[in-house]
Image: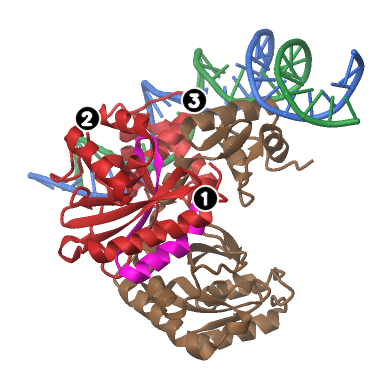
Chain colours: A red, B brown, C green, D blue
Amino acid sequence: MSRNNASGSMLEKAAAILECFSPSGGPFRLSELSERTGLPKPTVHRLAADLVHLGWLERSGHRYRLGGKLFELGSLVPHRLDLRETALPFLQDLFEATRETIHLGVREGLEVVYLERIHGHEALQLPSRIGGSLPLTCTGVGKALLAFSGAELTDEVLSRPLPSLTPHSITDPARLRMSLEKIQVSGLAYEEQEAAPGVSCIAAPVFAGDTTVAALSVAVPRARFSPAQLAPAVRTAALGLSRVLRGGVGV
Amino acid sequence: MSRNNASGSMLEKAAAILECFSPSGGPFRLSELSERTGLPKPTVHRLAADLVHLGWLERSGHRYRLGGKLFELGSLVPHRLDLRETALPFLQDLFEATRETIHLGVREGLEVVYLERIHGHEALQLPSRIGGSLPLTCTGVGKALLAFSGAELTDEVLSRPLPSLTPHSITDPARLRMSLEKIQVSGLAYEEQEAAPGVSCIAAPVFAGDTTVAALSVAVPRARFSPAQLAPAVRTAALGLSRVLRGGVGV
DNA sequence: ACGCGTTGTTCCGTGACATGGAACGAAGTT
DNA sequence: AACTTCGTTCCATGTCACGGAACAACGCGT
């Protein structure tokens, strides 16, 4: 029924099979893979066997999952790895100061990709996942990135319909533009229930020299949201990280 | 010169290209990839182009790096993801209590694979990397895993030559067996400069029900190593995580 | 117990497409 | 300017991926 991105070279088919697992992640049966990819069952059977052989897929009984080799390779992606490594101490500081959920994200096209997310025992219900992407327009990290990535990008984003994750997500271009301007003067992005109901967020951009390379944020249950206490911590972490990156991390 | 694992299906060749990046990670030129894989240049050229098209490889100028899609897929590997998520709060506690480098690892075959590694501003020089694997026999996490994974595995490991990461790594089977027995009675694994010079480590196994699913550790510069203070923290974190996993995480 | 729907799996003739040697052009090196 | 080494394109060859059809192994409802 799905008639997904179907065929082409063998690689594309293999990729299509692996793509089935994002973002659902969950184990799939052969026929589910066949249906989701639009590929005939024997083809999926053979390819899946090959992928298992390579360690890219794992198979227990009749269920397929992503394999350990992908985790290994994914951990080596250089830009992600380096940035995460240098950012981690600052994220830890921020966590220790606030004891709330911390995010680190970079921009990729018109979306934000999360590189790290740390939290304590009380886990918020959030749409963000490490490695996952969300719209720039309705997340704290995304808005911080967007506000400091040049006017062309802002125009590009505003020229399209604005996606929304919750009823509070900003869908009016004019309102978003105003919000971005406020972010530019204050250096901090606020977000209230635009990404997840009941959760507010405050974010700050991270610079390497004069280009925006990332943003970090702290997400808080709405009931506990007190900008006066969080803002200095977030700003401090972002500035500290930016100072270390000044020499730094290549694009 | 390398005559690596050469050819076969197209997937194997593509995998061979990607494997070039572990653990070096660094960017490679076309001819380097050709040499390392043993594949002819035109073949690598075509495959690399396909991989770039899929987002598995990135190309800037004439240099190839691993692509963002791999990071995304790697973050979805279920066993890794779930365990890391539930373990994170306990790792944070342990970090906050010790302010030292924390590791979380699982066993995969005869090696330990690290799922998480958090640290502060002072980063130790360690061979461990997230997603990377090391021998079970010369790391704290590895020894904790090995000591609680059954006698057959111990015999299997001891029947082979013991690898070493430093001159202090244990290479005598008898000594290792004794060390493992001590770990079994104390519930804690000690490791002194066996993985990296100047670094000591104390680790504890993590159970889900009655099976060992992971181990966590704290690594400390030898000068600061004081087991009396670290041991209770490590044990507490491991027990806390085990308690949460009791219901839990499937194999 | 039986039949039916659905699953995972094997088989195999066909042809699409990956293959890699050879040739080319573009840098960088001596 | 002659040479080396790189990335890239071309194309005739034959390999190997392809997927329909047939088979086997469950699970299920009555």
User: For the N terminus of chain B, which image quadrant?
Assistant: top right
Q: Which mark is residue A9?
A: 3
Q: Secondary structure at mark 2?
A: loop
The chain letter under disc 3 is A
> How much space separates mark 2 and mark 3, taking CA atoms?
34 Å
Question: Which x, y percent locates residue A52?
Answer: 49, 46
Q: Which residue is mark 2?
A: A161
Q: Secondary structure at mark 3?
A: loop
Which quadrant of the structure image shows residue C28? top right
Q: Considering only order in the chain, which callout, 3 or 2, is on the residue closer to the N terminus? A: 3
Three-letter code, disc 1: Lys
Q: Work out whether residue A75 or residue B182 is closer to the camera in this orientation and state it.
A: A75
Question: Which x, y percent locates residue A6?
Answer: 38, 26
Question: Which x, y percent locates residue B14?
Answer: 58, 36
> How much space separates mark 1 and mark 2, taking CA atoms?
38 Å
Q: Which residue is mark 1?
A: A69
Three-letter code, disc 2: Pro
Task: For residue A32, say whether it is visible.
Answer: yes
Three-letter code, disc 3: Ser
Q: Secondary structure at mark 1?
A: helix
**Magenta segment includes A89:** yes
**Magenta segment includes A103:** yes
The answer as to whether the residues below labels 1 and 3 share one chain is yes
Q: A177 above or below B26?
A: above
The magenta-colored residue range is A83-111
Task: Give the residue drawn at x 45%, y 48%.
Answer: A207
